[in-house]
Image (cartoon, helix red, strand yellow):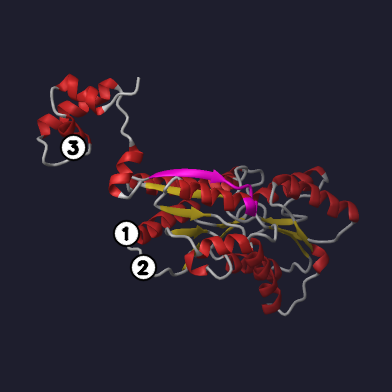
Amino acid sequence: MNVKLADIARVTGFSINTVSRALRGDSRISGQTSRLICSKAEEMGYIRNEVAGSMRSSRTNTIGVVSADSSNPFFAEVLLGIEDAARKMNYSILLINTEEQAENEYDAVKLLIGRQVDGLIIIPVFDDPKNLSMYESLGIPYIFAGRRVKGLEAHSILHGDEEGSSEVFSYLLETGHERIFYLAGPDRISNSVDRLEGMKRAFREKGRAFDADLVVETRGHIDDGYSEMNRALNKGLEFTAVACFNDLIAMGVLKSLYENGLCVPEDIEVFGYDNLNMAQYMQPRLSSVDVPKARLGQAAVEELMLHIEDGNRPYNTLEMKPRLVFRETTKR
């Protein structure tokens, strides 16, 4: 049964107007009356019509979240941060995954706007003209969490992808590795572009030349790490270290190396990226670049709320610092 204000009014003996104001938390209604009405409403199973409320206030207290890959635990940790911050601000979220597809991203944004969300947090693909045009014409605030879009970098909260990658390769070069196998991410996302540039920067700064045959693009999944490592070993490719676009790839790499009788880190050093919670429980425990995932989600909500409250607030790129975490897959 759909309980209406009139039903609560009839049972409590108050007018519909008084019931409505009490359920909205109107301070002009006495505490005793509010408690009585709210208690009876809960007992009857009343559910407030948030859409009607938003039509009166022009706010829905809802944030649309466009995430990238439902199979990647990285985004789950970011979403925990988003949900935690939103809840503290009395906001709800509507979540859609795009599976890294530009067309899905476009449809998701349009759908969420149709649901009248107050703002958007998006984990976007890198360079899609149709999506760029859409973002340039959006009429509500939006923040890119952990990624950037060409021309709209000011909307981004980033976490030092180029810097973190450069530090990984600098460490490996400084510790004597001349041939470093890099399993890169898909080129349609900015993290891949920036981490690849970080690799190039490290080689450049150390006065070394990297071998393009040692750089392989992947989709960023566990099975990519496993299959590409098997392929490299079967081809007889020579390397003494493996740097991975993310921890998922590194997991597949470690399985392949183990099955091929190679010891980590004695034979091959392995470095991941993202520092997923599971990285510390792997065997051996994975060295990785820490990305403050929950904090990224929280910061995205906090920054978005500032723009929701002030539509004229200028956007500025925010940067978080990466940090190398050394565990058992490296000699340090």
Q: Tell me the amino acid under the disc marked 1.
A: Glu
Closer to the camera in the image, 12 or 249:
12
3D distance between C-alphas at marks 2 and 1: 9 Å
The residue at which mark 3 appears reads as 21
User: Which mark is on residue 55?
Assistant: none
Q: Is residue 252 left or right of residue 111?
A: right
Q: Of the residues tagged 3 and 1, which is closer to the observer?
A: 3
Range drawn in magenta: 92-103
Compared to 146, does 50 lie above or below?
above
Return the x and y of residue 37 as percentages of the image width and height. 18, 27
> Is residue 126 at least partly visible in the picture?
no
Q: Tell me the amino acid under the disc marked 3.
A: Arg
On the image, which quarter does residue 197 sit in?
Answer: bottom right
The residue at which mark 1 appears reads as 309
Pick the quarter of the image with the C terminus: bottom right
Q: Residue furthest right?
A: 235
